[in-house]
Image: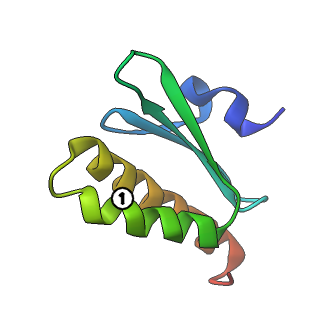
Amino acid sequence: MSVHANPDLNGVHFGRVVVTIDSELGDCVLWVPTPGGSQRRIHLNSMDEIEGSLGVHAGNAKNDPLSADMVRALRFAAQRITGREGGRR
């Protein structure tokens, strides 16, 4: 079973954002709350996608606390994945 199937058990919390990381596959899933109270699932399949999302949310982080939580989660995921890959992309 995928680590992404149970974010409560396998996830790391950054404020209101939860990230699950599969370092063997090099992907992560962000679980982000929506205004309606549900969770939005954002699956990022590679370091390129993680870095792209990081760039988008870093620009909003000063004015949006949820984006700031996402930036912290994405940085954590990138560090875990690149540590597993030995610095490869």
Secondary structure state at the residue bearing disc 1: helix
Q: Residue furthest top?
A: 37
Q: Quadrant of residue 87?
A: bottom right
Amino acid identity at mark 1: His
The residue located at (62%, 73%) in the rendering is 48
Q: Residue furthest left?
A: 63
Decide: is 35 above or below 70: above
Decide: is 71 above or below 41: below
Quadrant in which the N terminus appears: top right
**What is the number of callouts on the image?**
1
x then y, percent, for residue 58: 31, 64
For disc 1, the marked residue is: 57
Decide which of 33, 73 is in the foreground and name it.
33
Quadrant in which the C terminus appears: bottom right
x then y, percent, for residue 49: 60, 65
x then y, percent, for residue 42: 58, 43
Give the image's coloring scheme: rainbow
Q: Is residue 23 visible?
A: yes
Decide: is 82 above or below 30: below
Q: Estimate how packed mark 1 is, as few (under 14), some (14 to 19) or many (20 or more) residues with alpha carbons within 10 Å.
A: many
Q: Is residue 79 visible?
A: no
Decide: is 38 above or below 86: above
Task: Give left or right: position of 54 versus 22.
Answer: left
